[in-house]
Every structure is written in C-alpha cells, then in structure tokens.
C-alpha cells in the first residue's frame, strides 16, 4: 500500500534459500597420499603380430631378381626354375611322441626323445621369470624348420647338371648342397607397416649347432617383406586342385605347361567336391598330376626328366634304390602323415616322420581313404597358388630382403641382430643334463640388405618369404617365437641439432632403434640384465586366482654413432591436461654398447612436452650416468642396491611442473628487456641445478599434445661434464612415465536464491552461485575437477503493471 495508486489486501513474503558444499580431497590407501597417474608404463610400448602358426606357411616360390643367389629365378615355364629347391619341412612336433602314452610309438627310446631337435620345450627354459596362469609348466609350440640341402624338394626335376644346377649323385642326392635352398611364404594381414609402426622381425631361436655341428659350418637365413610371387610353378597360370577333372566331371578343361596340368576355369570356391572319388582325383598337388601321370608326363616329353634318370641309371651313375625312389614319385610331392602303421613298423625316427608332412599330393584325404582311427589330413582345403585367398595369382616380385648369418662364430650378442642370449641346463628324457643356448634376434625392418623390384615404402607389405641357403649339411631351426613387433612410440625423423632446432629436412646422422626389454625375457641380458626400477613391483593379475605376476617392461632407445650436438628421439601423440599435478617422473637407465666407450655425462636424456614438436614445448634435460656391466650372475632383482645401480637416482627425471612456469616467466622477462634478441621462437635455457629446462614458443600444460623422449650428444661441456666432440653410441631404457603429487586442495561451491512476493503486484527473484577451482563431485577424477572460478547471477521479475492505470 506504500506504492502510489496501489491498494491491496494480499500479503507479501520474502523467501531466502541457499546451499554450500566443500570438497575435501582424499586418496585410496593403495596409491598413497601423493597419488600416481601413469602417462605410459611402457607395458604396451611394443606389441606383437604373431607369425609362428605353421598352417599359415606355404611352399615358397623361387625368389626372382637376384641372379647372384638364384640364377634360375628368371626362367618362365621352364623346369629349371625349381631345380635348386631342396627339402624343407616345417611343423610343430606332436607331444604324443615325447610323452609316454598309449599313442607313443613303442620303438621310440628315451634317447630318441632327448635330442634337442625334437624334445619338448617349456617356457621356464627360456623365460624363467614368466609365470604360467595356473602354475602348471607350459610348453611352447615350437615352430621347426628342418632343412636337408642334399635332398630334393617338391617339383625339383634336377638330374644331369645344367647351367643353373649341379645335378644329382648316384644316391639320388643333390650335388653341391651349398647352392640349394628351401623356403616358405605366408600372407601378412597387417599390410601398412607405417601406419601400424611395425619396426622389427623378432624371434627366439635355439642354437642350431647344439648337435650335428662337427660337419655343419652353417649357412644363411633370409627374410623377404613385400610382394612375392605366388606362382610356385612359374608359368603365369594359377594352379588350384579343385579345378582339375573328376570322375563326375571328366570334361573340365585343363591346359598343359612344362610342369603338368592347370585348370582353364577360374577358381570361385576354395573347397573340394564332397564326392570321395573326386577328392582322390583332385588332391594331387600343384602339378595337376598324380604319381602315375607324372611318370607318363615326364617320360614322354622331349629331354624329359625321367629319360635323364633312365640314362644315369643305365650308365651306372644312379643306384637301383635311388632310381626306384625317383620313379615312384617323380615330382617329390607325396604327402605322408607323421603317424602311421608303416612308420611304426619301419621304426621311423621323429625327425624323419615329418619329412613328407608338407607334401601336396594326397595331403587332404578323407577318413574313408585312410581307414585309420584318427584323422590324417594336413588340410581340408585344396592346394592353390593363391596363399592370401584373393582369387588372384600375384606374380610380382618387389620386396625388401633381410639377411641373418647362422654360423657358429656369428652367434654373438651385439652382432648379427642378436640382442640377448639365454643359457639353460635342462634335464632330458634319458636323465642326462645338457646345456642349451637360446638367442633373441631383432631385425629392424629399416635395416634391409637389398631392395628387389620397385618397392619404395612399407605401406603395402602383403607377404613374407623366409628361406635358407648356403648350408652344406642338414640344419634344424627351432623358433620359440616368430613375430613382427609394432610400437606405440615412433621415431622422430627430423633433425634435432642444437643449433638448428627449428630447421626441417636434411639427412640426420647416426641411427635410433626403438625396442623393448622386460623382466620375463631379458632377466639374463648382457652386459646389463633387466631388473625392475626401485620402488616398482610387478602387477598381480586381478583375473587369476593363482596370484600370477604380470610382465614388466621398459622401452629401449638405442643410438649408434650419434654425432656431437645431434639428438635422436621417440614420440607419441597424447591429449593431456596436467595442471592438477605437481610433478612428472620417469626412470632412466643407460649402458654402453659393447665395443664402444661411454662415460658419465657423455650423453643426456631429455623429455619434451608441448603442443607441437618444434615450436611450442617445454624440455627437461638430464645428464646420463652409465651403469657398469653386471657382475657374474647378473644384478639381483630382489636387491634394492642392485636396482639403484641399474636405475641410478641421478638419471631419474623428477620435474616440479612449476619449474616450467618459472622458465617461461624468466624467458618473458629477458624478452622484454631493451635490445634483447630473445623471442618466442628462441630456444631459451633455464638451469635447474645440474639439469636444464628449455622453452620454445608458448606451450600450455593444459593442452599437452605430444611427448618426446630422446638422447642428445651435447655439443658443449655442460653440467660439470667435459665434451670430447666425438660421436657416441648407447642403449637407454626408460620406464614408468607418470604424474605424481596431485593437487589435494579442494574447492567449494555455493548457491543462493531470494524470492520476494509483492502482494498481488508481482514477484522479484534474485539468484547467484559461485564455484572455486578444485571443486567437483566425489566420483570425479583429479583431471575432471574445475580449474576456474565460476560466478553467476540472475535477476528476474514478474509485475502486473496494469494496476497503475
């Protein structure tokens, strides 16, 4: 009623309400009061692409484009193309031969089962620190490659010497075995190596000279990555068994080549006919001929293979038994399952049982064909010159070639791609104890021996071919692992020269290899074996009731011939806001590469964080202290003292994040001085004791997009260490990159609301809220809490202005 023109009997009211919340931060007892948030623990810094599965491997075509190694590789529709192929068997030995069960052939003695080339291999033999899921010893399905350089491989029609082959001796064996080869090939399903960041071919190999070494000087193992020909019998035609004539369809068209018969039709379905008679007619190998037809085919043709065999036998240059064997299976492609009553009756050894296991003729029999109580088929699918099943015959050859020397004097750690060696004493089946060596090979895909064809990059790697050559005696290669290794961290390919930090392009000197080292595989590594960093423990598998410890791994940066003033680095992309943490930490280990001199302070390790790699970043640099070679028996993982020797406290990166802010303020202060030549593009140093901070541009800890870890060979004497101006080589391990000491200062928030009712004239409402940094709901993580002061106000009215009129 105090307002002019207003008279009312309605009451007025004032309502005030508010709420207040204060976040009191806490931490789980499991992580301690300081708290840890991992950026990267490097357990996944490298992952594997498995290559060991033997069914994926197929008989390899003869490599082309290398007349020095394969003079026969240039021939098309000519039997000389396969005349140097020797017998190569690849298989995983069935444990029934190695365990005393009712299925084990009775003639196999304990000595037969004790050969290193056939015995069972358990994980603990190679990786003593690896724990099995159920605490039961786990055996390894070892991939075996058995190469017999003086025995004919499939589709080798060598008889008399030719311009590319040495012929056979009177026992039917190949002359000059060192010129012979054997190989297998497979498809690679991860084709783009650049996108997947595939860096290595890695495998663990048993010492191939543990037996038979007195007459075996060794030979060479080769890998081809790229496009390899699927045309095993090179004639430009795709051979596939299910396209051959059958009793139900004898009119299927075929063409004749130098090798035999090939279907005229296109393959549409990769399967045999269900009729058993059709299976027998089609399951005859890539030459399209069974044994009887092979005899007719290779005897009737001009200058035929079997005519030469007859001539050698008539001249007394071929024994009766060898003559009979060559006539029985002219193409040397017959299949025999590794079990069978005939093998048991003939008391065939374990190794010899697998010699015909990779034959192509008769390798898909039905149960009606064998009349045995167990399946004997190696495959249920027809053999085809199309190993990646894309219905196309790939005959192009363009690939990278890698060369590993398998000779006794080359089996040395640090040479020949050998990175580790495990020596183990095992108890054999016959009760004897024997010492065996296992070698870890890491072949960088960038370190190829030669390039064949027009391949220019690693964006389309469709096949791998693996072959052995230059062996004069049989050799058994036992692969405990065979993998491609891909990494989460990539090599930084631009220069990091101290004086030209922002320049792009140019060819950097020296090399960087990125790999991994872990407690399971490298606990006996030389010169320094792997132990866990101080204060770090292996994680217990939460899904396993047996309290099984998981693997623990670090990333390896290995630099070779790093020039004075130059640096090499690995990087990965991230999206981080690290303002709620006070420190960033990382463990660092450094060691000299055998044969190279390295002292404390010769190299530095740096970590770079920013929004890009060259213009906007913070960098922290620590001088590298070198760990001495391990004493006999290695460093003890259970000793805190030994752990500190391997992971010195002086190497530890422990950065208070406010140091970056201080460095930026110091840079800006210098930049604002009159006549200063410093700008935001300048790489500005800021000293932190013996360590150094660098800042470039305007990096922001709320928007970290890249992390780079690298090794630098300083161009000047710094941090109390002298510079000798020489190039350096070293191996550096980095581990446990983490954020610690999170912000434990909570925030508060409040809401208030006042509502006034002015009788029947209207209402007036005033509301406000405020929230301070650090406030958030209790389920939010540190990084999800508010980082800013938020204030808001609201005023609203609703009036009946008509009452004034």
Image (spheres, helix red, strand yellow):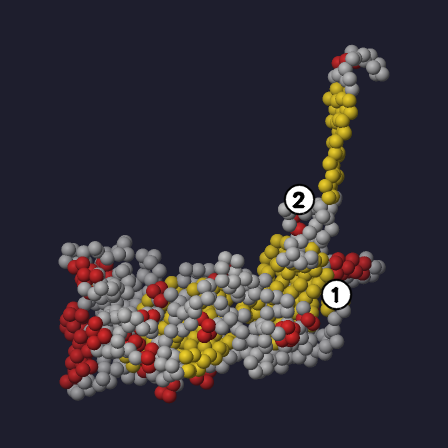
Q: Quadrant of the C terminus?
A: top right
| Place of residue 694 in the rendered image (x, y in percent of width and height, measured from the top left) | 72, 64
| Place of residue 711 in the rendered image (x, y in percent of width and height, measured from the top left) | 63, 70
Q: Residue at horizontal 26%, vertical 82%?
A: 173
Q: Nearer the viewer, mark 2 or mark 1?
A: 2
Q: Residue at horizontal 43%, vertical 75%?
A: 205
Query: How many callouts does the rendering have?
Result: 2
| Place of residue 165 in the rendered image (x, y in percent of width and height, measured from the top left) | 29, 80
222 lies left or right of 494: left
Q: Earlier in the sequence, mark 2 or mark 1?
A: 1
Q: Quadrant of the N terminus?
A: top right
Quadrant hosting residue 632: bottom right
- Image: 702 above or below 394: above
Q: Residue at horizontal 26%, vertical 76%?
A: 106
What label does residue 793 carry, if any? none
Q: CA distance from mark 2 to mark 1?
A: 40 Å
What label does residue 777 carry, if any? 2
Instruction: Determine if residue 301 is in view.
Output: no
Q: Residue at horizontal 62%, vertical 69%?
A: 533
- Image: 25 above or below 313: above
Q: Toward the viewer: 461 or 539?
A: 539
Element on which disc 1 rests: strand
């Amino acid at each position: 009623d105090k307002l002019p023109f207003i008279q009312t009997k309605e009451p007025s009211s004032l309502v005030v309400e508010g709420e207040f919340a204060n976040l009191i931060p806490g931490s789980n007892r499991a992580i301690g009061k300081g708290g840890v948030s991992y950026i990267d623990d490097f357990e996944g810094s490298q992952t594997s692409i498995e290559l060991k599965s033997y069914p994926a491997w197929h008989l390899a075509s003869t490599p082309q484009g290398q007349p020095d190694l394969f003079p026969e590789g240039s021939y098309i529709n000519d039997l000389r193309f396969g005349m140097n192929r020797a017998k190569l068997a690849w298989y995983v030995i069935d444990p029934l031969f190695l365990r005393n069960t009712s299925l084990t052939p009775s003639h196999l003695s304990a000595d037969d089962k004790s050969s290193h080339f056939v015995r069972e291999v358990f994980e603990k033999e190679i990786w003593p620190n690896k724990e099995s899921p159920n605490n039961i010893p786990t055996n390894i399905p070892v991939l075996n490659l058995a190469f017999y350089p003086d025995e004919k491989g499939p589709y080798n029609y060598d008889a008399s010497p030719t311009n590319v082959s040495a012929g056979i001796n009177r026992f039917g064996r190949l002359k000059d075995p060192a010129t012979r080869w054997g190989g297998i090939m497979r498809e690679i399903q991860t084709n783009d190596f650049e996108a997947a960041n595939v860096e290595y071919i890695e495998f663990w190999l048993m010492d191939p000279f543990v037996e038979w070494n007195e007459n075996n000087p060794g030979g060479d193992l080769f890998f081809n990555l790229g496009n390899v020909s699927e045309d095993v019998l090179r004639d430009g035609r795709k051979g596939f068994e299910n396209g051959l004539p059958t009793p139900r369809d004898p009119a299927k068209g075929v063409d004749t080549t130098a090798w035999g018969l090939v279907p005229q039709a296109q393959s549409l379905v990769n399967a045999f006919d269900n009729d058993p008679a059709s299976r027998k007619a089609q399951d005859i190998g890539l030459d399209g001929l069974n044994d009887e037809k092979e005899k007719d085919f290779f005897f009737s043709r001009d200058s035929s293979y079997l005519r030469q065999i007859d001539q050698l036998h008539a001249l007394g240059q071929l024994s009766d038994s060898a003559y009979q064997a060559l006539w029985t299976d002219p193409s040397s492609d017959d299949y025999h399952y590794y079990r069978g009553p005939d093998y048991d009756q003939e008391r065939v050894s374990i190794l010899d049982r697998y010699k015909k296991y990779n034959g192509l003729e008769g390798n898909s029999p039905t149960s009606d064909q064998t009349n045995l109580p167990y399946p004997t088929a190696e495959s249920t699918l027809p053999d085809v010159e199309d190993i990646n099943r894309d219905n196309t015959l790939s005959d192009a050859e363009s690939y990278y070639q890698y060369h590993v020397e398998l000779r006794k004097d080359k089996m040395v750690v640090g040479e020949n791609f050998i990175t580790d060696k495990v020596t183990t004493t095992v108890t054999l089946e016959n009760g004897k104890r024997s010492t065996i060596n296992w070698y870890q090979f890491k072949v960088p895909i960038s370190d190829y021996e030669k390039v064949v064809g027009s391949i220019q990059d690693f964006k389309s790697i469709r096949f791998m071919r693996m072959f052995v050559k230059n062996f004069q005696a049989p050799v058994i290669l036992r692969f405990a692992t065979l993998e491609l290794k891909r990494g989460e961290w990539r090599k930084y390919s631009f220069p990091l020269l101290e004086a030209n930090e922002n320049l792009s392009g140019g060819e950097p000197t020296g090399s960087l290899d990125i790999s991994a080292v872990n407690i399971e595989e490298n606990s006996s590594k030389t010169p320094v074996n792997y132990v866990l960093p101080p204060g770090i423990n292996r994680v217990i598998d939460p899904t396993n009731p047996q309290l099984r410890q998981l693997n623990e791994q670090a990333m390896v940066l290995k630099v070779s011939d790093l020039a004075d003033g130059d640096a090499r680095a690995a990087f990965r992309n991230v999206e981080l806001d690290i303002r709620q943490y006070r420190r960033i930490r990382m463990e660092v280990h450094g060691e000299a590469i055998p044969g190279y001199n390295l002292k404390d302070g010769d190299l530095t390790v740096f970590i770079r964080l920013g929004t890009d790699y060259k213009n906007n970043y913070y960098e922290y640099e620590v001088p590298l202290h070198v760990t001495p070679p391990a004493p006999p028996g290695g460093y003890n993982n259970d000793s805190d003292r030994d752990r500190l020797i391997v992971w010195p406290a002086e190497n530890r990166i422990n950065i208070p994040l406010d140091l970056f802010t201080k460095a930026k303020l110091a840079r800006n202060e210098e930049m604002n001085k009159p006549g200063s030549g410093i700008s935001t593009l300048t790489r500005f140093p800021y000293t932190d004791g013996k360590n150094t901070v660098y800042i470039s541009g305007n990096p922001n800890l709320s928007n970290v997009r890249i992390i780079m870890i690298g090794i630098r060979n300083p161009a000047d004497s710094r941090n109390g260490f002298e510079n000798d101006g020489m190039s350096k080589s070293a191996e550096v391990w980095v581990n446990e990159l983490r954020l610690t000491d999170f912000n434990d200062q909570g925030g508060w928030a409040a809401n208030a609301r006042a509502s006034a009712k002015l009788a029947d004239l209207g209402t007036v409402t005033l509301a406000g809220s405020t929230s301070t940094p650090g406030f958030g709901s209790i389920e939010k993580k540190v990084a999800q809490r508010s980082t800013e002061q938020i204030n808001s106000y609201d005023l609203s009215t609703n009036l009946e202005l008509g009452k004034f009129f």
